[in-house]
Image: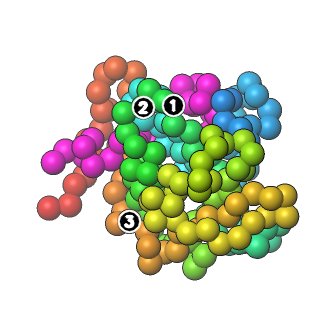
Amino acid sequence: MSTEQLQPWRWSYRADPRALPLADRHYNRQKIGSPQFVPPGRCVVLLTDDADALWVTSWPIAAYVQHAWAGAMVCSLFRREPTCPHRASTLITAAVAATRAHWPDLPALGMVTFVDPAKTRRKRDPGRCYRRAGWTPVGCTKGGLIALQLLPADCPTAVPARPPYAYGQGDLFELETAA
């Protein structure tokens, strides 16, 4: 099985112009049109080949975090366009696997994300795609966002993202694969 079949994500970066339209359409975007769409600090940015899904893992320094899950990695942005052929829960699992390949030593609190039920499509369970990917509701923020968490023991095996998009030229470098 090829890496592409295993991993729908490619490495991207915090100011990728191909990802900017997706970031601008995400409900938590604070400054639409700003070339950078990732919070300050350490990050993993992933984008699908067709730029129809975007994922950002942030790993802020715990001392600067004001929520109850300080020290955890944060999915600060996940956007999947309706035209994307991949299921949202599959993309989430693959993004966590790519993040884990980049940062193998996960913090004890694992990863968290925050869902605003007022700004997402109305569903029985806000954050349903995360729940299907194994994330568990663990409370709410003071602002009413639903917190979902994925502990290290529940994280998928590390699978690196594919090389950055090469503008139709194919992969510039082959990934090393374990035998």
Tag 3, which secondary structure?
A: loop
Q: Residue at x 34, y 57 (%)?
A: 159
Instruction: Specify whether residue 91 is painted magenta.
Output: no
Instruction: Please identify the quadrant where the C terminus is shown.
Output: bottom left
Residues in magenta, as a range: 1-23
Q: In the shown orientation, is residue 130 left or right of residue 119?
A: left
The residue that mark 3 highlights is: 156
Precedes in sequence: disc 3 or disc 1: 1
The residue that mark 1 highlights is: 81
Q: Residue at x 54, y 25 (%)?
A: 18
Furthest toward the top, the residue is 168
**Cβ–Cβ under 8 Å for marks 1 and 2:** yes
Q: Which label is found at residue 107?
A: none
Tag 1, which secondary structure?
A: loop
Confirm whether residue 95 shows in the render.
no
Position of 87 relative to 35 (above/below): below
Of 107 and 113, the residue lying toward us:
113
Task: Give, as a three-letter code, the residue at label 2.
Answer: Cys
Position of 18 relative to 156 (above/below): above
Tag 2, which secondary structure?
A: loop
Q: Residues within 10 Å of mark 1 (few under 14, many from 20)?
A: some
Task: Give, as a three-letter code, the residue at label 1.
Answer: Glu
The residue that mark 2 highlights is: 84
Q: Locate residue 81, reporting x and y percent.
A: 51, 31
Q: In the shown orientation, is residue 160 left or right of residue 72?
A: left
Of 141 and 74, the residue lying toward us:
141
Q: Residue at x 52, y 74 (%)?
A: 151
Marks 3/2: CA–CA distance: 22 Å
Q: Locate residue 74, reporting x and y percent.
A: 63, 59
Q: Locate residue 143, reporting x and y percent.
A: 84, 58
Task: Give, as a three-letter code, the residue at label 3.
Answer: Pro
